[in-house]
Amino acid sequence: MQFGEVPKHTASAWAMKAFDIDEGSRLRFGAGVRYVGSVLSTTEGWQQRTPGYTLVDALAEWERDNWVLSLRASNLFDKRYFAACRVYGDCFTGNGRNVVGSLGYRF
C-alpha cells in the first residue's frame, strides 16, 4: 500500500573528505546523492503518477584559524524534474541548481 502524494522509496548518501593543508588550515570536499521515488496522487477514481528523480549535491570548504569559506551546491547538474503532480492537473517543478557561498567566523 502506498499513501497518496508520498513516495514509497527514498534514499540518500553523503560523503566528505578533509585535508590538512598546514597548521590551522583545512580543506574539505563533500558530495551527496538524493533519490525520491515516484509519487501517486489519487482522487475520486483518478490517478496521476509523478516519476522519481535523483539529484546530486556538493560542498567545498576552506577553514583557516576561525574563518570558514564555503561553497555549497544543490541539484549540481541542474536536473529538471517535477516535485509533485496532482490529479487536478497541478504540477510543480523541482528546484533548479542552487549555489550558495558563505564566509563565517567562529568565536
Image (cartoon, rainbow, N blue to C red):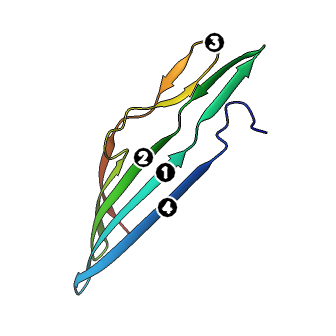
Q: CA distance from mark 3 to mark 2?
A: 27 Å
Q: Name the secondary structure under disc 1.
A: strand
| Residue 20: quadrant of the picture | bottom left
Q: Give the mark nearer the N terminus: 4 vs 3.
A: 4
Examine the rendered structure and indicate whether residue 39 appears above or below residue 89.
below
Residue occupying the point 56% across, 54% down: 11
Task: Give the CA distance from mark 4 to mark 3.
Answer: 34 Å
Q: Is residue 26 above or below residue 94?
A: below
**Place of residue 77 in the rendered image (x, y in percent of width and height, measured from the top left):** 31, 44
Residue type at mark 3: give it.
Answer: Tyr
Of 20 and 32, the residue lying toward us:
32
Q: CA distance from mark 1 to mark 3?
A: 27 Å
Q: Residue at x 31, y 70 (%)?
A: 28
The residue that label 4 is drawn on is 13
Q: CA distance from mark 1 to mark 2?
A: 5 Å
Q: Which residue is mark 1?
A: 34
Residue 88: which numbered mark, if any? 3
**With respect to residue 77, does 18 lie above or below?**
below
Which residue, given by chain and number where applicable, does mark 2 sit on?
A: 55
**Left or right of 15 on screen, residue 71:** left
Q: Are marks 1 and 2 in contact (CB under 8 Å)?
A: yes
Q: Badges 3 and 2: C-beta atoms under 8 Å apart?
A: no
Residues 22 and 55: in front is 55
Q: Residues within 10 Å of mark 1 (few under 14, many from 20)?
A: some
In the displayed structure, 22 sits above or below 59; it is below
Q: Secondary structure at mark 3?
A: loop
